[in-house]
Image: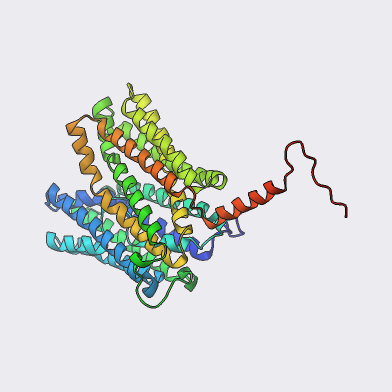
Amino acid sequence: MKRDRSGSFSWVSRDGKIIIAARGVRTFGQGFIAIILAVYLAKLGFSLAQIGAFISVGVAGSAFWVFLESFVATRVGRRRLLVVFTFMTAGAALGLVATNSFVLLLVFSFLGSLSSGAMATGPAQPLEMASLADAASPARRTNLFATYRIVATGAGAVGALAAGLPVLYQRAFGLSEVSAYKVMFLGFVLCLLLVVLLYALLSPAVEAGAKQEGLTNPFRLPSRRVIFTLAGLFSVDALAGTLVPQTLAAYWFNTKFGLQLSSLAPIFFFSQVLAATSLWAAARIAARIGLINTIVFTHIPSSLFLIAAAFAPTAWMAVMFWQLRAFFGQMDVPTRDSYTMAIVRPEERVAMASIHTVGRSVAGTVGPSAGTALWQAISASAPFVACAAIKIAYDLSLYFMFRKVRTPEEEERARSRSAIESREPAPGQAPEVSMR
């Protein structure tokens, strides 16, 4: 790819680079918080049920703020909301350090959208996605979203490695275990303050002409039918995906094949590497066959590999099918981001991203419980098969409902091909020769 003299991608706007950098810093912090959060709460003496409630309240808070921003983003402004929501999360993280009251911790979890995932979506992500849509040319938009996701994946992985720092703090500074965890929360606050600084550097162009007087009602937007139909479809996909979360998959490998943590860690690390690699491939494939085709025709093989893994007779075959599933399973992410931001107006992008995020968050809260219930009621393979079957049904539904809904650049390419084909001579017919 073409790079400018500073070593950055020249086809990405300054605002786009700032947003990607902010996402990287934020996800780095979320990477180590995701690992230590439950352990920290347990060290404070809270039960497993209380820890689950804390996480659920954080997910609910995220969904609430995302839904709210779909109404107010065009009036308040994307840049201002990015700063406000990040300050709220920083304040909530400070609250975790300052109090041991469970009621107050629940309040902080809701206000700060605190949850347990390194890649957990919060109110910042829909605003970032809406702003990124204009940070590159339409031809490069999918590449841009792939870059955005790759940076987030890599930063989250590095953040996970940083989760081992509390042990070093205890040895080097003689801190107690709880105090060492509190240092990590302070580090998370510093990361978020850096993110605030980056957001403050965004130009007014980040609003993309979307800022306007009055509130935006997603239920009255011109594209509301498309927005809510896609949100419903993506919610089904999210429900299916959370039937087999990484934690449950690791437990399955352990119980079925006896694989220990020393073996599981490299398996899932390599899965992340393959997933990140596939994001670049997705952008290239989409440029040739279209966004919807890429989403569907890479997702279906992923589901078939998941079924194959569930019934694999040996550990090495199960691991192989799992890695193939990991490679194909994330190709729909940047293409989905690009597609959803391209088929609506600029002033509708926050609503599209917000409703999409809310739907996936709500559906995702049901999946893990349903997956374990299927495991107990039927067999260990049941959640794998259910996940794959639902995803295939989602893919086929998406294809038949939206295969003719193209982005503006796809329409332009189709018109160009039609024009070229109309000038080509029929088989056996000599080309026309100008007599001028």
Quadrant location of the C terminus in the rendered image: bottom right
Is 86 rendered above or below residue 314? below
Residue at the outermost right position: 436
Left or right of residue 86: residue 284: right
Is 267 rendered above or below residue 89? above
Residue 257 in sight in this render: yes
- The residue located at (27%, 59%) in the rendering is 63
- The residue located at (64%, 52%) in the rendering is 416
- The residue located at (35%, 33%) in the rendering is 306
User: How far across and down, in percent of the image, does residue 77 sit?
Assistant: 39, 72
Which one is nearer the viewer's eye here, 426 or 419?
A: 426
Is 47 rendered above or below residue 135? above
Is 252 rendered above or below residue 59? above
- The residue located at (41%, 56%) in the rendering is 24
Left or right of residue 28: residue 135: right
User: How far across and down, in percent of the image, does residue 65 sit?
Assistant: 28, 64
- Give the quarter of the image for residue 298: top left
User: How far across and down, in percent of the image, does residue 342 sit?
Assistant: 48, 58
